[in-house]
Image (spheres, grey):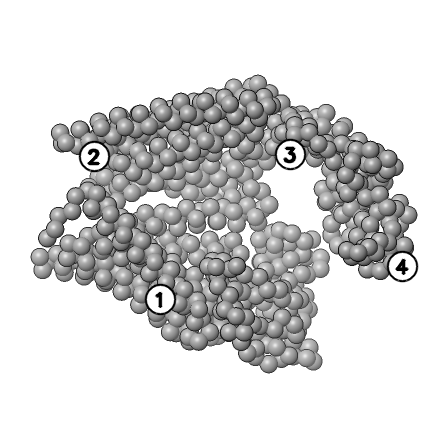
Amino acid sequence: MVVLGKKGASFVETIGLIGAIMIFVGVVWIIAYNWEEMPDFLKISILVISVLASFSSGIILRHQDYEKIGRALLILGALLYIASIFLIAQIFNVSLDIQTTAWLFLLCWVGIILSAYALDSPENVFVSMIAFLIWFALQFLSFAQETEDFSGGILTFGFLGIGILFFGLNLLHRNTGHKFARVYQFWSVFYFLVIAFLISSMSIMLRLWDKGFSSNSPTFFTFSVFAFSLLIFLIGVAVSVGKSVTGKEIFYFVLIVLAFIVFIGLIYFVSGNVGTCYSKTCYDFKTSSQCSSAPFDWFCKWEGNSCFQESCEAYSSNESFCNSAPSDLDCKWINDSYYWRCEPASRCDTLPSEAECNASPRCEWGSYDGRFGGGYCFLKGQNDNNKDCRQNDNLKEDCLDNDLCRWNSSPAYDQELPSGIWAFWIILNIFFMAFLLLCIYYGYFLKMRKIVTLSFVAFILQILYKFIEYARYTTLGLGYTFVIGGVFLLVLGWLILKWKKDFSVNWASSEEKK
Amino acid sequence: MEEKLKIQLIRLFTAFLIILAIISSFIVYQYWPLLTGGKIVLATRPVDPYDPLRGQYMSINYEISNIENLSEDFKSGDYVYVLLKKDNQSIWRYENFSKAKPTKGDFVRGKVLSYGNNVQYGIEQFFFETGAVIPTTNLTVEVKVSDSGRAKISQLLYNGKPVEIDSKGGGGYNPFFPF
């Protein structure tokens, strides 16, 4: 038997994986293109037999020392199983709503994880974790859609729960020396990195808890997951501490979890309070009485369960109908070389210059955002109101007290953020950087290249994202931001490469000694 | 060596059982209303979009997808039982709605959506081969409804007769290279 070196084995693994994905796409393609010609029984049989054939050939090749190709075929089996679930759903015209799609991914996850244990395939545990992530996100979204209340803070707690769950499963598997322990360890780090990324992002931080905390179905779902995760973690600690895991590792893990909980909790007091106070539009009035109380010159009208801004477009069917439009709308019939239409004699949003705009009695030149210059021709009443509302930027309560203003937790481009927010953001980012370094160290400590690589990728993505974020939220001016950011990135890039090089050398020498 | 192979085969057999059990349970669950349900025909208002993940489908809006005054008694996510009555064109039309499962008559179970008075029955999509041509007017949908009110599409009807799908009529739209 030819013994391949590390690089050769990795090459075979890559080729095998690409082959598996190509076969997967090919099978799905063939079935999709001959959908109507095939009876349902044949479609399902082809899919199920493909799954079973992939698993069988994977097991046989793995047994005959073609380990890498065998593993690729097991992954192919898992992918074909996912395709089977979705194509069977298609045969039965299963609904496309979020909840049903979440159920389908749950079926995918259950099937792959159970078969992964049966086949002793860590690769398929990895694939099942992807299905699990999609299921969790979709299930949360489905509950949030039902209650019309999407809370980023609650979702973040959910991710934290899953991170704890996978760490607990890692402990349980380490205790028995099971090889899946490392897959759970990787995914645990992945979830913690996702949370760190979420909470250290200014855009997300400002909106994380913008709707406060409500005890509804998304919260109940998330905290059930969290409680179950804690239980698994505690069982993991009880059976493994002092044997396969040191008390020190558990202590640091608990410390990190507590730090995350504290930071997510602290964001509660920050998010939602910084933002922009805009003028409402007709569409923001949710009841008939609110709609009719809108200022006269906003032209709001309640019809078909919603409030909309009446416009000349609604009278576009013919010239006489256009002429019958309310006189306040100032409509006129136009029949030029392009098409016929009914539009305002002085439609504000089509007036290109400040002079033309201000010449119209209904319109006024203004700007939502002074940062990039330019402007926009507004309906006069709304522009005046918008100016009044913007006085309450960063003052949520005052903004909401005014019935004609609406609150948006995302600051406008021309809006200065309070220095306290910047200070908190810097603290969160220092925490994230420290956590990333800890993950790199942890990967090195456990001799897990995948964790080290994941952390380095997260590190680089984080730096790039911070640069974009800084440019978005600072009013320093784009020119200065690009120069400072560019220099910072070049220096940092050089440091990372140097560090990674030293790190790889140390790793190699430590493996040699071993 | 033989012992190791035996263990591998036992593992493989277990994986087969798991996969077959899940897939067959899923098929039985989906097939149950078609096997045991009573037949009704619903009037539609279809459009024709495309789902990149699951192929071409027709998104069907039913006459009973929007029910007046529903939002007063129900909140988003609640189940609603919609009672139906057959008219002289052999189409089942809306008669009433109820929170509790009706004890008699034809009915279908739906889920109240978060906006307006909309109800979803899980029969809003009909999938067909990419590139196939399906009439989009004068369509009704034959549905089988189980005792619990769960509905499944059994076939599309055009002018009251089963639709014949022209699977190559559209020139073979390719989902991977749509342009």
> Closer to the camera, A136 or A79?
A79
Q: Nearer the viewer, mark 4 or mark 1?
A: 4
Q: How dense is the environment of label 4, judged by Cα within 10 Å: few (below 14), some, or many (20 and up)? A: few
Residue A76 locus on image (x, y percent): 31, 57
Q: Which mark is residue A47?
A: 1
* Label 3 to label 2: alpha-carbon separation: 50 Å
Query: In the orientation shown, which residue stands out farthest toward the left?
Result: B1
Q: Nearer the viewer, mark 2 or mark 4?
A: 4
Mark 4 residue type? Ser
Relative to B93, say whether A270 is above or below. Answer: above
Sequence-wise first label, 3 or 2: 2
Sequence-wise first label, 1 or 3: 1
> Closer to the camera, A310 or A292?
A310
Q: Which mark is residue A167?
A: none
The residue wearing badge 2 is A244
The residue wearing badge 3 is A408
**Same chain? Circles 4 and 1:** yes
Relative to A494, say whether A153 is above or below. Answer: below
Mark 3 residue type? Asn
**Same chain? Circles 1 and 2:** yes
Name the residue: 19% across, 42% down: A6
Which chain contains the residue that carries disc 1?
Answer: A
Sequence-wise first label, 2 or 4: 2
* Label 4 to label 3: alpha-carbon separation: 41 Å
**Same chain? Circles 2 and 4:** yes
The residue wearing badge 4 is A320
Q: Nearer the viewer, mark 1 or mark 2?
A: 1
Mark 1 residue type? Leu
Under tag 4, what secondary structure?
Answer: helix
